[in-house]
Amino acid sequence: MVAPMVAPMVAFGQSAGEVGAAGAASPPSGAPRFALPQIEAGREQFHRTCSPCHGRNMVNSGTTSFDLRKFPADQPERFNQSVIQGRGNMPSFKDALTPEQIAFLWAYVGSRGGKEP
Ligand code: HEC
């Protein structure tokens, strides 16, 4: 999905233009941040892996585990870190999930379960 990094070439008269413009850059404001199929894949994954602690549809009392409905939607890095490394009483999912699965989970959590795509 993410375009491979293109090493800057030193070539005369060539513009770097188009190269590497695609990829992880943020979408133009107003555009949905997540595609529906990603959110849906994340929802399934979430209910397989995370709901025992975080609750169905992310609903839990918020006393024993983090209320993911309140996770800051502008902190995908923190989300990745916490899921990959674990946090407090939450185990690491480094070996259990692929980066793609974690990205789907972020689509689900970051969009508030599809309510704020
Ligand atoms: C074994 C129970 C358990 C499972 C399973 C679990 N979590 Fe957690 N999670 C917790 C607890 C407890 C916390 C609060 C950690 C703390 O801050 O002490 C937490 C916190 C978090 C946070 C907030 C971390 C932060 O940056 O403050 C995120 C994001 C999160 N979990 C995502 C997930 C996702 C995604 C999954 C599924 C892959 C998952 N969790 C599965 C128990 C769990």
Image (cartoon, grey):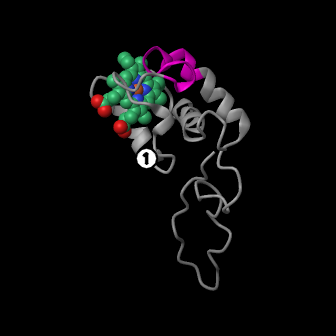
Amino acid type, callout 1: Glu
Q: Is residue 49 magenta?
A: yes
Q: Residue at x 71, y 41 (%)?
A: 35
The image shows residue 10 at horizontal and vertical percentages of 53, 77
Whether the residue under disc 1 has CB within 8 Å of ligand 1: no
Determine which quarter of the picture holds residue 43: top right
Residue 87 seen in this snapshot: no
The image shows residue 111 at horizontal and vertical percentages of 60, 40
Q: Quadrant of ligand 1?
A: top left
Q: Is residue 53 magenta?
A: yes
Q: Residues within 10 Å of mark 1 (few under 14, many from 20)?
A: few
Please identify the residue farthest to the left as the structure is shown: 88
Answer above or below: position of 52 versus 78. Answer: above
Secondary structure mostly seen in magenta is: helix
Q: Which residues are magenta?
A: 45-59
**Residue position marked by numbered label 1 in the rendering:** 77
The image shows residue 24 at horizontal and vertical percentages of 58, 54
Q: Residue 19 versus residue 100: which sits nearer the camera?
A: 100
Q: Residue at x 60, y 84 (%)?
A: 12
- Regarding mark 1 in the picture, which secondary structure is present there? helix
| Residue 64 as seen in the image, left or right of residue 24 | left
Quadrant holding the N terminus: top right
The image shows residue 42 at horizontal and vertical percentages of 60, 29
Q: Residue at x 67, y 35 (%)?
A: 38
Residue 107 seen in this snapshot: yes
